[in-house]
Image: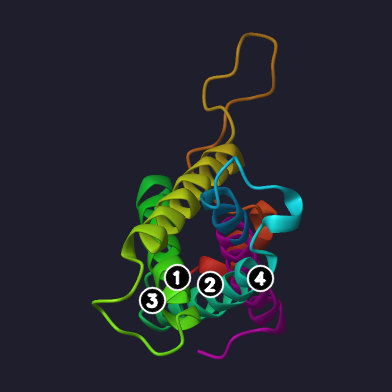
Amino acid sequence: MAWSRARWRAVLLDLLERAGWSAGQVFVATLLAGGAATTAGNLPWKYALTLALSAAVSSAILTVIQYASHTTELGFWPDVIVRLGKTFLASLAASIAAAGVFDVTAFDWTAALNVAFLATLSALGKGLLARGNPNPPPGAAAPVPAQSSPSTLPTATYAEAIRA
């Protein structure tokens, strides 16, 4: 079955949304992993930008693989778990790519895992915030529908992108 123009657009937007969030999460996580004692001038801006770009590319590749394997139409929690795994892997891959010549014995695993953990934690927060509150207080907005997702795309666009 041929994809429509609307489907291609929705998938491209989904790919950009996921890569953009991964880049932002890794960028912030890299800066936070630098510690609270550093000043703005001493933060690893160039390193953080390099990791963010690498994470965006890794996320895009992993998302293309997910689309190619037809594993995009998931419930909320399975989708969140897949996104967390992809964020962790994209962050770790970005740290390894930024290392230049990779030496498993000399690589700073602690820093790489710290950045990956912080990025994954922020991905969880983003997913939960994108879903909204499934049990709002009386008088508040209507409950979140069962088909809610951890995506920040408009619901119709995301539904078009992930449909089988």
Task: Return the residue at label 3.
Answer: 70
Alpha-carbon span between mark 4 and mark 2 = 10 Å
Q: CA distance from mark 3 to mark 4?
A: 31 Å
Q: CA distance from mark 2 to mark 1?
A: 5 Å
Choose the circle earlier in sequence order: 2 or 3.
Answer: 2
Mark 2–mark 3 distance (CA, rounded to whole Å)? 22 Å
Amino acid bearing label 4: Leu
The colouring scheme, among rainbow, by chain, secondary structure or one colour, is: rainbow
In which quadrant will I find the C terminus? bottom left
Q: Which residue is mark 2?
A: 55
Q: Residue 65 location in percent, x, y?
A: 41, 81
Mark 4 surroundings within 10 Å by alpha-carbon count, few (fewer than 14), some (14 through 19), many (20 or more): some
Q: Is residue 84 above or below residue 69?
A: above
Identified at 41% across, 84% down, the residue is 68
**Residue 85 placed where, x, y %?**
36, 60
CA–CA distance between discs 4 and 1?
14 Å
